[in-house]
Amino acid sequence: MGRYLVRDMLISTLKMDQLLLEVTTSAATHQRALALLHEMRDRGHHADEYTLPPILNSAALLRVPAGADALHSLLLRAGLAAHLHVANALVDAYAKLSRHGAARAVFDEMPHRDVVTWTSLLTGLARSRSHDPALRVYRDMVASGIRPDEFVVAAALSSCAGATALELGLSVHATAVRLALDPFLSVGNSLVSMYAKTGSLGEAKKVFDAMRVRRDPITWTALIVGYAQNGRGKESLEVYTDMVRSGCRPDYVTFIGLLFACSHAGLVDAGRAHFRSMQAEHGVAPGPDHYACMVDLLGRAGRLDEAMDLLSQSTTRLDATVWKALLGACRTHGNAELGEHAAEMVWGLDPTDAVPYVMLSNLYSRARRWADVARVRTLMKSRGITKEPGCSWVGVNGVTHLFYVEDRGHPRAEEIYRKVEEMMDRIRAEGYVADTDWALQDEGPEGREKGLAYHSERLAVAFGLLAVPAGAPIRVFKNLRVCGDCHSAIKMIAKAYGREIILRDANCFHHMKNGLCSCGDYW
């Protein structure tokens, strides 16, 4: 009888394993999978190396960190940690939960790893925008002799885009071609996005054209957004027209890129028409992101009343992004009253967000309302809000050089500061006059101008002039929006030195050459 009991338990366990595997193939039933595990254990059956991987996946997709920890303990007690596919599932689960320390600890303890192990860690880091750690994992993987697959390459390219690591992106592209991985749709899409997000639109278009027979909405959207962010809004709209003609349906993200393009090209009528067409023609309900783009579009055109009318008619729940877009427009046009209202709305939705404090302070400083600037800063301090420091960086020969405002920490600081003085002298001779409205301190004109001269992006440009070979573009990246005075100055520096300067700020790319900018001074 005992033999039959063991047989029946074995059959029952196998059936339970099969059911668990079937259940976890559907995202809607991951909760049921976890419940089945509890039922299985209540019946005296033990989870094995076949049961645990899909359950770990369910715990991760359901965002249940405690569940992943409990399953980790369970597999350790069961002696299953040495099974490669179980350990891989654990790394993947922790990575999906953005528990990167735990994922790395499991990874480091594994005696054997395969491409799935590396892919799980790398894609988890890339997905959570931990791009620099993801790229370190990619380099370690290649150095370990593991052959990347299409998932690794796509994730690495995504992190190259996020980290603006064009040089490494070129290397990953070469690897994809060498391993014949470039025909995969995910790789092609990641290549278009990587080149677009690093300001290399010509290369993005080449990859896009080569994907003629295998494009999906992600492919088209990557190019639409790429053109939009690089100041080529009309071309962005042309790509959208081609997309619709091809029979590919635009989605939620496509319209964000499209409306962004209209906003940054000043195409108010086109933006309105595309916004109306979303629901009516394509069945895409406008969300907060689309309303933020429309507010930005109308705000840039100075139509603040129309922007408020649009928001008052909205049936969508508006988030902080929408009100920050309105606050940005108020800063541009000096509308303090409406700006204060927008800031209050952001604080009501997210009181820890430093952006409205900074933007409102900028609005007051441009109006020389120094008492209000001090009041906002005091309010920030009393609420424990800290501002993200502005910084700019330049990559030279695979090394990233980082600069902050009035930064003297670089080994070549003396050379850089002499170069800044030389730059400013040359553009003053060409007619440059500092726009001290962008200075954030209540000082005399000379003090405000000096403060502007040592903004992080100008230090980065000066270093680029010293270190980047003649004829090559100087690529500068900034974590915040470039100020109006730096934008004007760097345009003139590009002309004075006969260089192309590509500045990417938090909003878009600025391709500066011969005293002109791709944004048309409309960013």
Image (cartoon, rainbow, N blue to C red):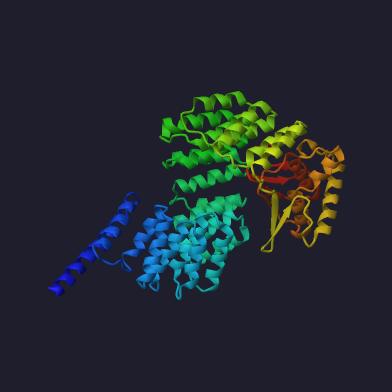
- In this picture, residue 307 sits left or right of residue 518: left
Q: Is residue 484 left or right of residue 191?
A: right
- Say above or below: 488 vs 170: above
Q: Give me the residue at 30% from left, 59% from top.
A: 37
Q: Say whether residue 67 is visible.
A: yes
Count of labels shown?
0
The residue depicted at 45 percent of the width and 64 percent of the height is 91
Q: Position of residue 265 (x, y in %)?
A: 62, 35
Asked where in the image residue 52 lies, by quadrant, the reply is: bottom left
Q: Quadrant of residue 507?
A: top right
> Which residue does the image show at 70% across and 43% down from the upper left?
482
x and y, in percent, of residue 322 in the image: 56, 35
- Relative vertical location of residue 408 with respect to residue 3 in this rendering, above or below: above
Q: Is residue 498 above or below residue 275?
A: below
Is residue 85 visible in the rendered image? The answer is: no
Q: Image quarter for residue 36?
A: bottom left
Q: Where is the N terminus found, in terms of image quarters?
A: bottom left
- Furthest toward the front, the residue is 382
- Residue furthest to the left: 1
* Residue at 73% across, 39% down: 484
Quadrant (top left/top right/bottom left/bottom right) for the C terminus? top right
The answer to which of 141 and 94 lies nearer the viewer is: 94
Q: Position of residue 119 (x, y in %)?
A: 47, 64
Q: Nearer the viewer, residue 467 or 440?
A: 440
Position in image of residue 436 (x %, y %): 80, 37
